[in-house]
Image: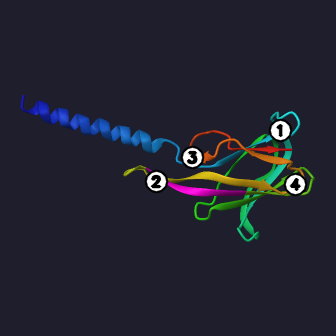
Amino acid sequence: MKRLPIIFILSIIFFSACKQDETCRESKEVFLRVGFFESVTNKAVSIDSLTVFALHQDGSAMDSLLYDNRKNISNVILPLNKVEQASLFVMKLNDLPQDTLSVLYENVEYFISYPCGMIITHTLDTVWSTHHFIKDVNMVHKNINTTNVQHLQVLL
């Protein structure tokens, strides 16, 4: 009978540890999700060939080829800079001149738990692009976190 409270306490500790472990297994990846749409009909489009790479804030090239001549692609997942509050991406569609997508945002530290640590989420502020093949960019969701939602619509 004296062992019953000890077993009860140990089982509570065991099950609470499992719950924390489940939280740590959830995705901690935070990406900007961009979809491509036709500007007149606003319908999703699939791009024949797309290349995307990131630039430093001063416009110099990074060693970060994110998509290399990807075929039949309708959306991209882009990593935002966690140290700066802006990211630049160069997009080349088929054989058209390239466009630069500029994204300004606020970095927000989000504490998950002591065993799981923290992540950096983002809140979109301003988005613009050059206009060779991109006609416009719409912000759909401003909060960028671990959820799988589209944040930007690029109108072609």
Q: Is residue 146 magenta?
A: no
Q: Position of residue 105 (x, y in %)?
A: 63, 56
Identify the residue under disc 3: 145
Q: Which residue is mark 4?
A: 131
46 lies above or below 110:
above
Location of the C terminus by quadrant is top right
Foreground label between 3 and 1: 3
In the image, residue 39 above or below residue 123: above
Residue 62: x %, y % from top left: 72, 67
Pinpoint residue 16: horizontal percent, then vertical percent: 31, 38
Q: Amino acid at mark 2?
A: Met
The residue where tag 1 is placed is 46
- Determine whether, in the image, residue 148 is placed left or right of residue 48: left
Q: Quadrant of residue 80?
A: bottom right
Q: Is residue 107 magenta?
A: yes
Hey, which quadrant is residue 107 in on the image? Answer: bottom right
